[in-house]
Amino acid sequence: MNLHDFDELEREAVYRVIAERRDMRHFLPDPVDPVVFKRLLAAAHQAPSVGLMQPWRFIRITDSRLRSALVSLVEEERIRTAGALVERGDEFMRLKVDGIQECGELLVAALGDQREQHIFGRRTLPEMDLASVACAIQNLWLAARAEGLGMGWVSLFDPVQLAQLLHMPAGSKPVAILCLGHVAAFYPAPMLKLAGWADERPLDELVFHNTWGGSET
Ligand SMILES: Cc1cc2nc3c(=O)[nH]c(=O)nc-3n(C[C@H](O)[C@H](O)[C@H](O)COP(=O)(O)O)c2cc1C
């Protein structure tokens, strides 16, 4: 208990949304309420960003031909990824890795152009712009879950081809295709875990003390 904490129910809601957010690949085709959609974008836009550069750009895809083009781009990359995975390629091809075709709203999240002007916090770590976009996407993801909507982050695409398709300026870069919409049910655990592709590691394997790998003494 301290002067600034939220009350118990509010705290529970925050931890619940974090625990119950899932990367969704199955969607219902129902439209997303435009008022809710605006709230989600506003939540994304409140994210922290390095030097307050706000490098995120969101492109809403409403043209059905563009949606189909995105489906094709992801399919091409899915096949290339399967090839790179060699012995797990067939298993990978059986996974559902996106819901682009059926989700109610489709967004491309991108890094804006002229980012080289922003040096604060990026001189030694220029990738902090990408970290900032990821913060915005996570805000969107959590807010969507609280609104009862699912979101899926898709990174299986060639960014150069996607940038061309969306007429993006030189220096900008698409980093995520975001599928957003109503779902029949949220997966009870990461879908990749349910599908037997990968398992989560426990937190204590990833927290060190004083030096890399150091344990608590
Ligand atoms: C940066 C990033 C890129 C991702 N790209 C994909 C993707 O291309 N296809 C996909 O099916 N899932 C993608 N995911 C979702 C992860 O597979 C998912 O977050 C992870 O398996 C844990 O599941 P959960 O989000 O339901 O907890 C991505 C997630 C992140 C954070």
Image: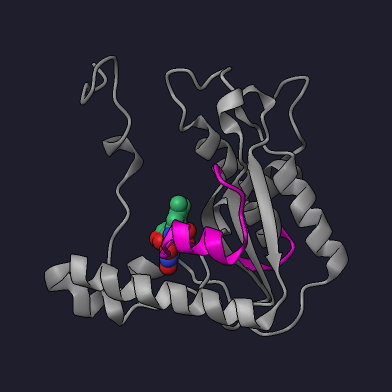
Q: Position of residue 195 (x, y in %)?
A: 32, 74
Residue 27 can be seen, yes or no: no
Q: Residue at x 70, y 47 (%)?
A: 44
- For the view shown, which residue lies furthest in the right direction? 35
* Left or right position of 100 against 1: left
* Left or right position of 181 against 86: right
From the image, which quarter does the N terminus lie in?
top right
Residue 192 can be seen, yes or no: yes
Q: Residue at x 68, y 38 (%)?
A: 47
> What colouring style does the render use?
one colour
Residue sitting nearer the eye, 9 or 182 = 182
Residue sitting nearer the eye, 103 or 208 = 103
Q: Is residue 81 above or below residue 46?
A: below
Q: Position of residue 115 (x, y in %)?
A: 58, 32
Q: Position of residue 32 (x, y in %)?
A: 77, 73
**149 falls in the magenta region:** yes
**73 falls in the magenta region:** no
Residue sitting nearer the eye, 20 or 56 = 56
Which quadrant of the picture is home to ligand 1? bottom left
* Left or right position of 124 against 133: left
Q: Is residue 173 above or below residue 215?
A: below
> Quadrant of the rendered structure where residue 78 is?
bottom left
Q: Residue at x 20, y 26 (%)?
A: 213
> Quadrant of the rendered structure where residue 48 is?
top right
Q: Position of residue 76 (x, y in %)?
A: 37, 75
From the image, which quarter does the C terminus lie in?
top left
- For the view shown, which residue lies furthest in the left direction? 87
Number of numbered discs: 0
Q: Report the span colored magenta.
A: 146-171
Q: Is residue 64 above or below residue 129?
A: below
Residue sitting nearer the eye, 68 or 15 = 68
